[in-house]
Amino acid sequence: MNQVIRFRGKSRAVENAFDAAAIDTPVDVLAQDSAGTAGPSALDKFLKAAIQAFAATSIASGVIVPSLAMGVDANGIAGAYYANRLERHVENYRYASDPAGDDTLMCDRAHQASKQYGYKIKYDQKLYRVSNVKIYTKMCAEGVSSSRSTGTRFMQITGETGPVLTMDTGPVINVDFQGFAFDANLANGPQFGGMLKAVPQGAPDNNGGLWYSALRDIQFYGFRCGLWLRAGSDYLTPHQFNEFSHIHIFRIGDDTENNLSSSLVLTGQFGQTRFTNCQFDGTNGTRFGTNVQIRPELVNDEANFCYHDWSGANPTEIASALTPGDVHFLPGTAAQNGKRAFLIYRSGTIHIGAWTENVDISYDYRNASRGNTIADALCTNGAKDWAINLDTGCTLHINGMTVAGELGTLIKGVASNQCLTGQHTIRVISDMQGKTSNLTRQKGTGANPGTLSIDGNTWLAVVTSTTPISYIESWHTWNVDLCIRAYDGDVSFTTGGNIAMPLDANGSTSQTLLVLHKGECMIIARDDFGGHVFRIKSIIRIPRFASAMPTSGQYARGEFVHNSVMTVDANGRYLKGWYRVTNTDATASNHAVMTDWRPEFAYASPKTIGQVTGASGTPGVGQIAFSWTAPNDAHYGGTKIYTNTVNDFGTATLRATETGTFNAADSRTVTGLAAGSTYAWLVATSYDGTANSTELALGPYTVT
């Protein structure tokens, strides 16, 4: 078979001519083989031949031809790898003079060509041995995957030092880097897997770190520090507007090595960045080291591979250290097998929606880390110390957090000036051993005995103490509801500070001691218009039946349980809520018995009520049994019964108050009456306590 290369006409289309009849359609650039079958072989064969001839001299010396971006392979053969539009294979950039077994220069040439000409650099399914791999601005590189068995892998050459993955001087923008695994060479000792350090390039308008870039499907395995995203601290070298997805960082080794290692470290001016479907992991089943650190840069970070003993003193920061902010760890990201899943130190607006597992501390907030959020997070099978720690000056909002598995405590606070909101969005689904530990402090002894520091919290669990609480410290202004829960035993409140005791059954403030039992709650609010005191809005009791008499102050007459949202009638005349009250007196032991639910009204103005009808009395031994029909008025609250031995209502004694339903028959037996003649009076009252202006006289009755 004879074959020629020729151009036809002005179109300069290529036709591959065979002995058989040729294709005459230039636009298709197709040819026929000897069997007459058409195929796109002509252009491919022509380009290969043309490239071989064109590149014979210029490429033989190792010079890259930008228009072709082709080189010679290890055997000096040009054009051995493809040039498919803007895709270039990394092997196109290998020179015959490159050291054997060292792919560093080849990779760097390829990445610089990508930076200059916009090529996508393609890598094979193999292990590349390098001193380091550097990413450049506007470069694009793609491996097969981050699999350590079937993907594209990098390993540092034995004897080399420094991070394996690095970046050029800034700003480095629009980087697309995906599908690679970085394996630690354990023969080189502790290593950084990646250190993307923001280094200025020149004038301020050219400064910057990593911007507008995406790193996807990247794995770091076995490094002392997997990835350090090292932004600057001069406001000119930030890492920002980046996305990291499917980043998998695995720490390995014995307990000592795991304790010293970290998966991901963010320092400096780092922000506007998302981590999606990432995994930060230690050796399976162990609890050592920190998976994710978010903090300022420390003076010994590079020498210590970002290790700090967070159980000891606070670290020493570099001068003018900045901290990350506006960083999002989205649901689907996991941090597991470590002492700490997330360590946030002096950093704000960090949003975590990750899953934590098999760690002692899930979320550790330190040193005035403010404005942070946990949202749609899952904490499971771990946190034996605590799930959340709030250090001095830290603020945190929770907007959805599910807690499951064997846990120690949910929230721990050890210092002042904390603020925690959104606790009602926490869902505990199993095996919580304790809810809180020192979230707010009951200071039973010391400089301020009897003081409860609420700070900015709206819900808190208080541990028991022998000193009653008389004073509340709080950042809150008036009319903000605060819920106090007795955590592990009785919590007592008393007078003498800024806590207003509830009224007793007679409407007086004689009560001096109020006790919440374990698990019971009290809602209080600050009243800045009534003496700047905290007033009790409601107390939620746990009914308990006991034969022993309650001690003084355990259940004061007049305490109640509130179980509804207050409602307002259409005309705004009254507020209405439903309550139960304790049924306690000085002789009975049924102090836990509650009345049925009943509504209470608060009127804008006094409401008069009609009088009872059909009233009668039946005397007996030391008693009179009264019966009547309540007035047909929805504002009816009850009927008061008075008696006297003379016919004088003004000096009569209130014997009983019977509540009931309007327009319904009711009755009450008054006991303890002396034998002889007894006069009686019935007075209907409304819910606001307003009595009918005319009492209904009955009797006299002869009591035996």
Image (tube, helix red, strand yellow):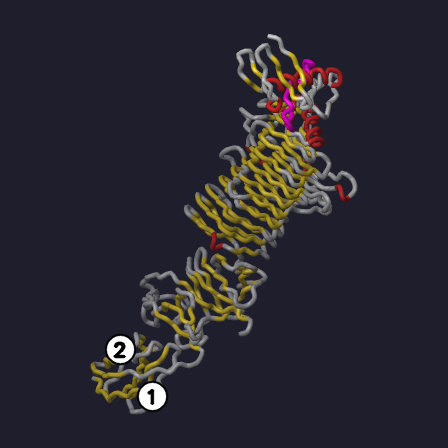
The reply to whether residue 18 is in sight is yes
Residue on which disc 2 sits: 668
Name the residue located 55 percent from the left edge and 50 percent from the top edge.
373
Mark 1 against mark 2, which lies toward the viewer? 1
Amino acid at circle 1: Thr
Foreground residue among 610 and 494: 610
Q: Residues within 10 Å of mark 1 (few under 14, many from 20)?
A: few
Q: Is residue 349 magenta?
A: no
In this view, the residue farthest toward the bottom is: 647
Q: Quadrant of the N terminus?
A: top right
**Which segment is the magenta one?**
74-88
Residue at x 26% of width, y 76% of height? 664
Residue 137 location in percent, x, y? 69, 35
Q: Residues within 10 Å of mark 2 (few under 14, many from 20)?
A: some
Q: Secondary structure at mark 2?
A: strand
- Residue 274 position (above or below residue 482): above
- Three-letter code, disc 2: Arg
Residue at 77% of width from left, 44% of height from top?
204
Quickly name the residue at label 1.
694
- Upstream in sequence: badge 1 or badge 2: 2
Q: Where is residue 477 drawn, in percent x and y?
A: 56, 66
Could you say which disc has been placed on residue 537 in the image? none
Residue 115 point in image, percent of width and height: 70, 32
**646 and 262: which is toward the camera:** 262
On the rendered image, what quadrant is the C terminus found in? bottom left
